[in-house]
Amino acid sequence: MSNFWCQKHEFTYFGQEREIDMGWRGIMGFEYGIVQAPLGPDISGPELVAAVANAGALGLLRVPDWEDPDYVRQLITKTRTLTNKPFGIGVILAFPHKGNVKAILDEKVAVLQLYWGECSKELVLEAHKAGVKVVHQIGSYEEAKKAADAGVDAIIVQGREAGGHVIGQDGLITLLPRVVDLVRGRDIAVIAAGGIVDERGYVAALALGAQGVSLGTRFLATEESYAHPTYKRKLIEFDQTEYADIFGRARWPGAPHRVLATPFFMEWKALPSHENETNQPVIGRTIIHGREREVRRFAGTVPNATTTGDIESMAMYAGQSIGLIKEILPAGEVIKRIVEGAQRLIDQQFAPVN
Protein backbone atom coordinates (compact mmCIF):
# COMPACT_ATOMS: atom_id res chain seq x y z
CA MET A 1 0.00 0.00 0.00
CA SER A 2 2.92 2.35 0.48
CA ASN A 3 3.25 2.97 -3.26
CA PHE A 4 6.03 5.55 -3.23
CA TRP A 5 6.70 7.97 -5.99
CA CYS A 6 10.50 8.24 -6.08
CA GLN A 7 12.58 11.19 -7.13
CA LYS A 8 15.76 10.03 -8.85
CA HIS A 9 19.01 11.96 -8.88
CA GLU A 10 22.27 11.14 -10.63
CA PHE A 11 25.37 11.70 -8.48
CA THR A 12 29.02 11.40 -9.37
CA TYR A 13 31.27 9.76 -6.77
CA PHE A 14 34.98 9.35 -7.55
CA GLY A 15 34.31 9.63 -11.26
CA GLN A 16 31.42 7.14 -11.28
CA GLU A 17 27.82 8.06 -11.90
CA ARG A 18 25.30 6.50 -9.53
CA GLU A 19 21.56 6.84 -9.53
CA ILE A 20 20.02 7.28 -6.08
CA ASP A 21 16.34 6.78 -5.30
CA MET A 22 14.94 9.36 -2.92
CA GLY A 23 11.41 8.43 -1.93
CA TRP A 24 9.92 11.60 -0.53
CA ARG A 25 6.53 11.96 -2.17
CA GLY A 26 3.49 9.78 -2.39
CA ILE A 27 2.02 7.34 0.08
CA MET A 28 -0.91 4.91 -0.05
CA GLY A 29 -1.75 6.02 -3.58
CA PHE A 30 -1.86 9.76 -2.80
CA GLU A 31 0.25 12.17 -4.79
CA TYR A 32 2.17 13.52 -1.80
CA GLY A 33 3.30 11.94 1.45
CA ILE A 34 1.54 14.58 3.54
CA VAL A 35 -1.37 13.81 5.85
CA GLN A 36 -3.65 16.44 7.40
CA ALA A 37 -4.49 15.17 10.87
CA PRO A 38 -8.16 14.77 11.89
CA LEU A 39 -8.51 17.92 13.98
CA GLY A 40 -11.25 17.61 16.55
CA PRO A 41 -13.90 17.93 17.29
CA ASP A 42 -14.82 19.45 13.91
CA ILE A 43 -11.91 21.73 13.00
CA SER A 44 -10.97 19.62 9.97
CA GLY A 45 -14.33 19.90 8.25
CA PRO A 46 -15.23 19.34 4.61
CA GLU A 47 -13.66 22.62 3.43
CA LEU A 48 -10.23 21.86 4.86
CA VAL A 49 -10.24 18.19 3.92
CA ALA A 50 -11.33 18.96 0.35
CA ALA A 51 -8.65 21.63 -0.02
CA VAL A 52 -6.00 19.17 1.13
CA ALA A 53 -7.32 16.44 -1.15
CA ASN A 54 -7.45 18.78 -4.12
CA ALA A 55 -3.78 19.63 -3.49
CA GLY A 56 -2.82 15.95 -3.73
CA ALA A 57 -2.41 15.07 -0.04
CA LEU A 58 -4.49 13.00 2.39
CA GLY A 59 -7.10 15.02 4.26
CA LEU A 60 -8.88 13.49 7.25
CA LEU A 61 -12.31 14.45 8.53
CA ARG A 62 -13.13 13.83 12.20
CA VAL A 63 -16.34 12.04 13.20
CA PRO A 64 -18.38 13.18 16.21
CA ASP A 65 -17.44 11.80 19.62
CA TRP A 66 -20.89 10.22 19.76
CA GLU A 67 -22.78 7.79 17.55
CA ASP A 68 -24.45 9.58 14.65
CA PRO A 69 -24.03 7.54 11.46
CA ASP A 70 -26.55 9.62 9.50
CA TYR A 71 -24.55 12.78 10.24
CA VAL A 72 -21.32 10.99 9.31
CA ARG A 73 -22.82 10.16 5.94
CA GLN A 74 -23.81 13.80 5.49
CA LEU A 75 -20.28 14.89 6.36
CA ILE A 76 -18.84 12.54 3.76
CA THR A 77 -21.37 13.61 1.14
CA LYS A 78 -20.64 17.29 1.68
CA THR A 79 -16.90 16.68 1.33
CA ARG A 80 -17.51 14.83 -1.92
CA THR A 81 -19.30 17.87 -3.32
CA LEU A 82 -16.07 19.83 -2.82
CA THR A 83 -13.57 17.32 -4.20
CA ASN A 84 -13.48 14.31 -6.48
CA LYS A 85 -10.22 13.16 -4.87
CA PRO A 86 -10.01 10.43 -2.20
CA PHE A 87 -9.91 11.42 1.48
CA GLY A 88 -10.18 9.79 4.89
CA ILE A 89 -11.93 10.10 8.21
CA GLY A 90 -10.61 9.78 11.76
CA VAL A 91 -12.27 7.88 14.62
CA ILE A 92 -11.39 8.02 18.32
CA LEU A 93 -11.81 4.48 19.60
CA ALA A 94 -12.25 5.69 23.19
CA PHE A 95 -15.68 7.09 22.27
CA PRO A 96 -18.78 5.25 20.92
CA HIS A 97 -17.97 4.51 17.30
CA LYS A 98 -19.37 1.25 15.87
CA GLY A 99 -22.26 2.86 14.01
CA ASN A 100 -20.01 5.64 12.73
CA VAL A 101 -17.44 3.13 11.46
CA LYS A 102 -20.16 1.16 9.67
CA ALA A 103 -21.27 4.34 7.91
CA ILE A 104 -17.68 5.06 6.87
CA LEU A 105 -17.25 1.57 5.44
CA ASP A 106 -20.65 1.67 3.72
CA GLU A 107 -19.62 4.95 2.07
CA LYS A 108 -16.27 3.38 1.08
CA VAL A 109 -14.20 6.36 2.17
CA ALA A 110 -10.60 5.85 1.05
CA VAL A 111 -8.98 5.77 4.51
CA LEU A 112 -10.19 4.93 8.03
CA GLN A 113 -7.84 6.50 10.58
CA LEU A 114 -8.00 5.19 14.15
CA TYR A 115 -6.59 6.55 17.41
CA TRP A 116 -6.67 6.10 21.17
CA GLY A 117 -7.61 2.44 21.44
CA GLU A 118 -6.70 -0.97 20.08
CA CYS A 119 -7.27 -1.69 16.43
CA SER A 120 -8.51 -5.27 16.04
CA LYS A 121 -7.77 -7.70 13.23
CA GLU A 122 -11.51 -8.06 12.73
CA LEU A 123 -11.97 -4.34 12.12
CA VAL A 124 -9.07 -4.23 9.66
CA LEU A 125 -10.47 -7.23 7.78
CA GLU A 126 -13.92 -5.64 7.66
CA ALA A 127 -12.46 -2.40 6.30
CA HIS A 128 -10.40 -4.21 3.70
CA LYS A 129 -13.47 -6.12 2.52
CA ALA A 130 -15.09 -2.72 1.94
CA GLY A 131 -12.04 -1.51 0.03
CA VAL A 132 -11.02 0.91 2.80
CA LYS A 133 -7.42 1.29 3.96
CA VAL A 134 -6.72 1.43 7.69
CA VAL A 135 -4.24 3.81 9.31
CA HIS A 136 -3.64 3.49 13.05
CA GLN A 137 -1.98 6.26 15.07
CA ILE A 138 0.17 5.05 17.95
CA GLY A 139 2.31 6.55 20.70
CA SER A 140 4.43 3.61 21.80
CA TYR A 141 6.40 0.70 20.38
CA GLU A 142 3.99 -1.78 21.97
CA GLU A 143 1.03 -0.12 20.26
CA ALA A 144 2.88 -0.24 16.95
CA LYS A 145 3.43 -4.00 17.31
CA LYS A 146 -0.29 -4.57 17.91
CA ALA A 147 -1.23 -2.39 14.95
CA ALA A 148 1.21 -4.17 12.65
CA ASP A 149 -0.04 -7.58 13.77
CA ALA A 150 -3.62 -6.44 13.10
CA GLY A 151 -2.67 -5.91 9.45
CA VAL A 152 -3.06 -2.14 9.11
CA ASP A 153 -1.96 -0.42 5.92
CA ALA A 154 -0.06 2.37 7.66
CA ILE A 155 1.03 3.46 11.13
CA ILE A 156 1.19 7.08 12.23
CA VAL A 157 3.92 7.41 14.85
CA GLN A 158 3.00 10.28 17.17
CA GLY A 159 5.76 11.82 19.25
CA ARG A 160 5.24 13.64 22.53
CA GLU A 161 5.90 16.91 20.67
CA ALA A 162 2.47 16.74 19.03
CA GLY A 163 -0.41 19.07 19.78
CA GLY A 164 -3.79 17.98 21.04
CA HIS A 165 -4.24 14.67 22.84
CA VAL A 166 -0.97 12.77 23.10
CA ILE A 167 -1.16 9.08 23.93
CA GLY A 168 2.56 8.32 24.38
CA GLN A 169 5.58 9.60 26.24
CA ASP A 170 8.34 9.02 23.69
CA GLY A 171 9.82 11.71 21.48
CA LEU A 172 9.42 11.26 17.73
CA ILE A 173 13.14 11.07 17.00
CA THR A 174 13.53 7.98 19.20
CA LEU A 175 10.23 6.20 18.59
CA LEU A 176 10.03 6.60 14.81
CA PRO A 177 13.18 4.60 13.85
CA ARG A 178 12.13 1.75 16.15
CA VAL A 179 8.76 1.48 14.40
CA VAL A 180 10.44 1.69 10.99
CA ASP A 181 12.66 -1.25 11.97
CA LEU A 182 9.67 -3.13 13.38
CA VAL A 183 7.71 -3.12 10.10
CA ARG A 184 10.67 -3.50 7.77
CA GLY A 185 9.80 -6.01 5.06
CA ARG A 186 6.06 -5.67 5.62
CA ASP A 187 3.74 -3.70 3.37
CA ILE A 188 3.04 -1.09 6.05
CA ALA A 189 3.76 2.59 5.48
CA VAL A 190 5.15 4.61 8.40
CA ILE A 191 4.06 8.22 8.85
CA ALA A 192 5.71 10.63 11.30
CA ALA A 193 3.69 13.01 13.49
CA GLY A 194 4.61 15.53 16.17
CA GLY A 195 6.31 18.88 15.79
CA ILE A 196 6.44 18.84 11.97
CA VAL A 197 5.31 22.00 10.17
CA ASP A 198 7.67 22.55 7.23
CA GLU A 199 10.03 20.96 4.71
CA ARG A 200 12.81 20.59 7.27
CA GLY A 201 10.67 18.42 9.50
CA TYR A 202 9.51 16.47 6.46
CA VAL A 203 13.04 15.69 5.26
CA ALA A 204 14.17 14.88 8.82
CA ALA A 205 11.31 12.39 9.15
CA LEU A 206 12.32 10.78 5.85
CA ALA A 207 15.90 10.51 7.10
CA LEU A 208 14.56 8.58 10.11
CA GLY A 209 12.82 6.15 7.78
CA ALA A 210 9.29 7.53 7.52
CA GLN A 211 7.45 7.51 4.20
CA GLY A 212 5.27 10.50 4.98
CA VAL A 213 4.34 13.05 7.62
CA SER A 214 1.14 13.96 9.44
CA LEU A 215 0.61 17.63 10.30
CA GLY A 216 -1.98 18.93 12.73
CA THR A 217 -1.05 22.38 14.01
CA ARG A 218 0.14 23.60 10.61
CA PHE A 219 -3.24 22.74 9.04
CA LEU A 220 -5.05 24.19 12.03
CA ALA A 221 -3.46 27.51 11.05
CA THR A 222 -4.98 27.58 7.56
CA GLU A 223 -7.73 29.59 5.93
CA GLU A 224 -9.97 26.55 5.51
CA SER A 225 -9.63 25.33 9.09
CA TYR A 226 -12.85 25.62 11.09
CA ALA A 227 -11.01 27.01 14.13
CA HIS A 228 -12.16 30.30 15.67
CA PRO A 229 -10.26 33.35 14.32
CA THR A 230 -8.94 34.11 17.82
CA TYR A 231 -7.56 30.58 18.10
CA LYS A 232 -5.82 30.94 14.74
CA ARG A 233 -4.37 34.29 15.78
CA LYS A 234 -2.98 32.79 18.99
CA LEU A 235 -1.17 30.15 16.94
CA ILE A 236 0.80 32.95 15.34
CA GLU A 237 1.29 35.04 18.50
CA PHE A 238 2.50 32.29 20.85
CA ASP A 239 5.67 30.23 20.62
CA GLN A 240 5.36 28.06 23.73
CA THR A 241 3.24 25.02 24.57
CA GLU A 242 2.71 22.93 27.70
CA TYR A 243 2.01 19.24 28.19
CA ALA A 244 -1.03 19.18 30.46
CA ASP A 245 -4.09 17.34 31.77
CA ILE A 246 -6.39 20.12 32.98
CA PHE A 247 -8.86 20.18 30.08
CA GLY A 248 -11.71 17.71 29.65
CA ARG A 249 -10.88 15.47 32.60
CA ALA A 250 -14.46 14.31 33.09
CA ARG A 251 -15.29 13.66 29.44
CA TRP A 252 -12.00 12.03 28.52
CA PRO A 253 -10.13 10.90 31.67
CA GLY A 254 -6.48 9.94 31.43
CA ALA A 255 -6.00 11.86 28.20
CA PRO A 256 -3.04 14.27 28.46
CA HIS A 257 -2.70 16.97 25.85
CA ARG A 258 -0.41 19.70 24.56
CA VAL A 259 -1.83 23.23 24.52
CA LEU A 260 -0.74 26.82 23.97
CA ALA A 261 0.76 28.38 27.08
CA THR A 262 -1.91 31.09 27.21
CA PRO A 263 -2.32 33.36 30.26
CA PHE A 264 -5.41 31.36 31.25
CA PHE A 265 -3.54 28.08 31.11
CA MET A 266 -0.54 29.41 33.02
CA GLU A 267 -2.86 30.66 35.78
CA TRP A 268 -4.61 27.30 36.15
CA LYS A 269 -1.92 24.77 35.15
CA ALA A 270 -1.66 23.49 38.75
CA LEU A 271 -5.38 22.68 38.91
CA PRO A 272 -5.89 20.08 41.68
CA SER A 273 -6.39 16.57 40.36
CA HIS A 274 -9.89 16.24 41.85
CA GLU A 275 -11.20 19.24 39.89
CA ASN A 276 -12.79 18.96 36.45
CA GLU A 277 -15.18 20.78 34.15
CA THR A 278 -18.43 19.36 35.55
CA ASN A 279 -18.86 21.92 38.35
CA GLN A 280 -17.33 24.89 36.55
CA PRO A 281 -19.14 27.98 35.23
CA VAL A 282 -20.30 28.19 31.63
CA ILE A 283 -17.94 30.47 29.70
CA GLY A 284 -19.38 30.16 26.21
CA ARG A 285 -21.54 28.36 23.68
CA THR A 286 -20.76 26.51 20.48
CA ILE A 287 -22.24 24.32 17.74
CA ILE A 288 -20.30 21.09 17.15
CA HIS A 289 -21.32 18.76 14.32
CA GLY A 290 -24.72 20.43 14.27
CA ARG A 291 -25.39 20.23 18.02
CA GLU A 292 -25.53 23.23 20.33
CA ARG A 293 -23.30 22.92 23.40
CA GLU A 294 -22.40 24.88 26.49
CA VAL A 295 -18.68 25.33 27.04
CA ARG A 296 -17.66 25.13 30.68
CA ARG A 297 -14.35 26.27 32.07
CA PHE A 298 -11.73 23.51 31.68
CA ALA A 299 -13.79 21.72 29.04
CA GLY A 300 -11.61 20.14 26.39
CA THR A 301 -13.60 21.66 23.53
CA VAL A 302 -11.54 23.96 21.34
CA PRO A 303 -13.25 27.08 19.96
CA ASN A 304 -14.53 26.61 16.44
CA ALA A 305 -15.93 29.26 14.10
CA THR A 306 -19.34 29.23 15.83
CA THR A 307 -18.06 29.58 19.39
CA THR A 308 -18.99 32.63 21.47
CA GLY A 309 -17.99 33.70 24.95
CA ASP A 310 -14.61 33.82 26.70
CA ILE A 311 -12.59 32.37 23.82
CA GLU A 312 -9.20 33.03 25.40
CA SER A 313 -10.08 30.86 28.41
CA MET A 314 -10.78 27.79 26.28
CA ALA A 315 -8.50 24.92 25.35
CA MET A 316 -6.17 25.70 22.46
CA TYR A 317 -4.26 22.61 21.36
CA ALA A 318 -0.96 23.09 19.55
CA GLY A 319 2.31 21.24 18.95
CA GLN A 320 5.81 22.21 20.06
CA SER A 321 6.64 23.53 16.60
CA ILE A 322 4.28 26.46 17.08
CA GLY A 323 7.11 29.00 16.95
CA LEU A 324 7.76 28.05 13.31
CA ILE A 325 4.29 29.06 12.11
CA LYS A 326 4.28 32.72 11.09
CA GLU A 327 1.13 33.15 9.01
CA ILE A 328 -2.28 31.74 8.16
CA LEU A 329 -2.15 30.20 4.68
CA PRO A 330 -4.46 28.32 2.34
CA ALA A 331 -4.07 24.59 2.88
CA GLY A 332 -2.97 24.06 -0.71
CA GLU A 333 -0.20 26.62 -0.25
CA VAL A 334 1.03 24.78 2.85
CA ILE A 335 1.35 21.58 0.84
CA LYS A 336 2.99 23.35 -2.11
CA ARG A 337 5.60 25.01 0.10
CA ILE A 338 6.46 21.78 1.91
CA VAL A 339 6.77 19.76 -1.29
CA GLU A 340 8.82 22.34 -3.17
CA GLY A 341 10.87 23.16 -0.10
CA ALA A 342 11.68 19.50 0.49
CA GLN A 343 12.83 19.14 -3.10
CA ARG A 344 15.14 22.16 -2.77
CA LEU A 345 16.47 20.99 0.56
CA ILE A 346 17.26 17.53 -0.76
CA ASP A 347 18.97 19.02 -3.80
CA GLN A 348 20.99 21.47 -1.69
CA GLN A 349 21.99 19.09 1.08
CA PHE A 350 22.58 15.87 -0.87
CA ALA A 351 23.64 17.01 -4.34
CA PRO A 352 27.34 16.43 -4.98
CA VAL A 353 29.81 19.27 -4.81
CA ASN A 354 31.51 19.76 -8.16
Image (cartoon, grey):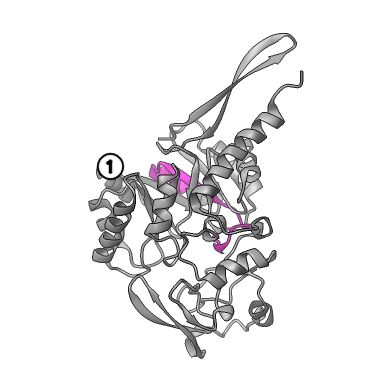
Q: Assess whether residue 211 is covered by the magenta stretch.
A: no
Q: Assess whether residue 148 is covered by the magenta stretch.
A: yes
Residue 56 falls in image quadrant: top left
Task: Give the amino acid at mark 1.
Answer: Gly
Residue 273 falls in image quadrant: bottom right
Compared across the picture, whether 138 is left or right of 113 comes to: right
Res. 89 in view: yes
- Quadrant of image for the C terminus: top right
Q: Name which residue lies at 48% across and 39% down.
A: 32
Compared across the picture, whether 306 is left or right of 259 comes to: left
Res. 257 in view: no
The x and y percentages for residue 277 are 51, 84
Residue toward you, 146 or 306: 306
With respect to residue 255, does 106 lie above or below? above
Residue 125 falls in image quadrant: top left
SS class of the residue under badge 1?
loop
The x and y percentages for residue 70 are 23, 65
Question: Which span of residues is magenta-colored?
Answer: 145-168
Q: Name which residue lies at 59% across and 44% down.
A: 176
The x and y percentages for residue 293 are 39, 81
**Residue at label 1?**
131
- Quadrant of image for the N terminus: top left
The x and y percentages for residue 59 are 42, 50
